[in-house]
Amino acid sequence: MSPTHHLEPDSDLPAELAAPARRALTQAGYTRLEQLTHVSEADIEPLHGIGPRALDQLRRALAARGWAFAGGTDERPQP
């Protein structure tokens, strides 16, 4: 059997999300986008594998459904 990328069967995380980010989220218990509406970006940003690109992909996926991270789409202070 050849190695393939297996997604959680009930996961709707973005397909383009890099494997380290996907693993970090699933290990933290987040397999569905809806779960991310209950946490802020600041809550998931410290997870290993979650960087600016992953956050942007997650923001876009949430926005496509009319959702956002808890507390808004971006809680980081603007310069």
Image (spheres, rainbow, N blue to C red):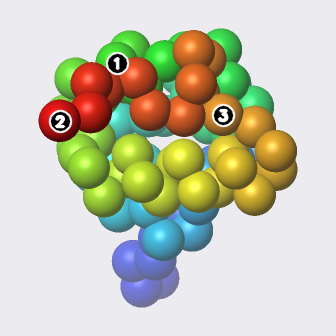
Which residue was labeled with disc 2? 79
Distance from Cα at disc 2 to Cα at disc 1: 17 Å
Mark 1 element type? helix
Distance from Cα at disc 2 to Cα at disc 3: 21 Å
Q: Residue at x 28, y 41 (%)?
A: 50
The image shows residue 70 at horizontal and vertical percentages of 61, 17
The image shows residue 68 at horizontal and vertical percentages of 66, 34
Mark 2 or mark 1: which comes first in sequence?
Answer: 1
Please name the amino acid that badge 3 sits on. Answer: Ala
Q: Is residue 27 visible?
A: no
Nearer-the-camera pick, 38 or 23: 38
Mark 3 element type? loop
Mark 2 element type? loop
Nearer-the-camera pick, 79 or 53: 79
Q: Image quadrant for the C terminus?
A: top left
Please name the amino acid that badge 2 sits on. Answer: Pro
Which numbered dot is residue 42?
A: 1
Which residue was labeled with disc 3? 68
Nearer-the-camera pick, 3 or 30: 30
